[in-house]
Image (cartoon, helix red, strand yellow):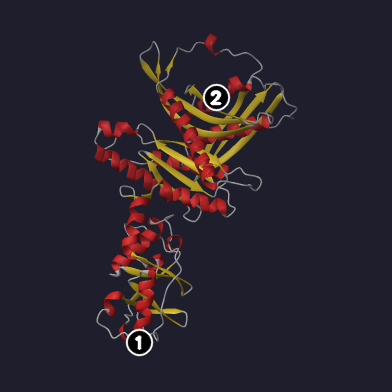
Amino acid sequence: MHEPIRLVANEKNQPSHSGDSLTKKVISMRRLGDIVTTPPRWVNSRHSLEVAVALMERFQLDVLPVVDNDVVVGAVDARQLLFADPSSKVADVMRRDVLLLQGQTPVRAAAMIMAQNGQDVAFVVEDDELVGMVKLIELVPEISRSYDPLTQLPWQDALREWSIEKLRSGHEISIIFFDIDRFGQFNKNYDHVTGDRVLEQVARTIERELEPDETVLCRYGGDEFAVATLYMQDEAQQLAARIARRVEEIRMPSVRETITVSYGVFGGRRTREREDVHYAATVDDLITRASRLCLQMKQRKGTLATLQLPLFTAEAEERPEPRVQVTGISYVAQGKEAEASVELTLGNSRVSRQMRGDVKQPSEELMVQAALEALTALMPSIGTIQIRHVSKVSVDMQGRGEKAEGVVAVVEWQTGTDTQLLSGLALVRDNVYRAAVNALLHALNRPLSRHLVAPEISPAN
């Protein structure tokens, strides 16, 4: 008797494409185990063809796996039985070149493997135990439904399924929603081919920053992308900010403008187990809230980018006391590391804080982070403040017909159940470091006026 030939395959031993492993390309796609629902039907090699025909007719199958000692050793299909003697053994006619795929194999990878091996049927196994079978034609709707051919990313249904699965298994998730700023300009100023290239570049940039085991990225629609992650909110916020910086580093020969994204982050804050949860509704709510925060950031950035500022005078800059004052600022870059230091004063209290980061990180971002650390130490009762966006901008000076450089800061301020998205802008006068700190204070000055009571803090150097 001939030894059976089995084509055992999964995504790990398949060739890579365009420099990325197939595993990354099919990240978060549904797995074969997710779509195989019917119990496996099979015969063994000692059964007669009569038994095989009876099983096929009863369960309306045109192919059956052959299993001996709990191992798939071959297959028999209806075409082989047309002219065979019904009393013959299955072993006499079965084919042995069967394709076995693990249940964890992504559907898209499975379709590629089946096509590469010239197989229109594959048997799904878990630790060599048969759990079902799939046909190549059955995978086509799944692939076309879940993937965007331009960016090679799954659509939002894959993100929803992944998120529901993680919530159901007890994990907490965060949703990050991205929207490309002024995307219409790329199509209008150049052409739709350039717009498509921008989408592809942004998709690859986001993808490179993600951990496949803890995140799923999808194209949500148009110029929008969404990420679901197991990160808690602070980590997700840091990830979103880092991705936004990486997007700004994209350079395309045919595009003059800097490519930027707005983003919103929501989730990752649960402190107790959910009870009677509708997981799909929870995911929809997280996506909705993240997309709203993204829209707010985009609107704020759009407003500030076109802001007409009045001429500044000494009288106009006078502010009522009490007021948080900036009494010390420094920025030092050495080697690969940079350090920002900010000292703030309120009444008789003084606090200084330092923040270290990569020297490649924009200095204005590091300064705002250090300023926020100092501010929350100076006023610990003000609630939770998170940095959403920091960047340099060019603003028109009303009445002068000229432009000036400024820094804009967008923060989210949470007090109890209330959440506000606040923005501030400061012109670069002495240096960009002081402008960055002033932009943060400008964003918070008005709401902070209700909290400006000097706290009991010992002076700090």
- The reply to whether the C-beta atoms of the residues labelled 2 and 1 are less than 8 Å apart is no
For disc 1, the marked residue is 89
184 vs 430, nearest the viewer = 184
Q: Position of residue 79 (x, y in %)?
A: 27, 76
Which residue appears at 54% of the width and 13% of the height? 317
**Residue 417 visible:** yes
The quadrant where residue 30 appears: bottom left
Q: Nearer the viewer, mark 2 or mark 1?
A: 1
Answer left or right for 56 relative to 339: left
Q: Secondary structure at mark 2?
A: helix
Q: Secondary structure at mark 1?
A: loop
Name which residue type carries label 2. Answer: Ala
Which residue appears at 35% of the width and 39% of the height? 222
In this picture, is 447 found above or below 177?
above
Q: In the displayed image of the protein, which residue is found farthest to the bottom?
A: 1
Q: Which mark is residue 443?
A: 2
Q: In the displayed image of the protein, which residue is found farthest to the top?
A: 315
Q: Position of residue 126 (x, y in %)?
A: 48, 70
Q: In the picture, which quadrant includes the N terminus?
A: bottom left
49 vs 410, nearest the viewer = 49
Q: Position of residue 192 (x, y in %)?
A: 25, 38
**Residue 338 visible:** no
- The tag earlier along the polypeptide, 2 or 1, is 1
The quadrant where residue 10 appears: bottom left
Which residue appears at 37% of the width and 43% of the height? 202
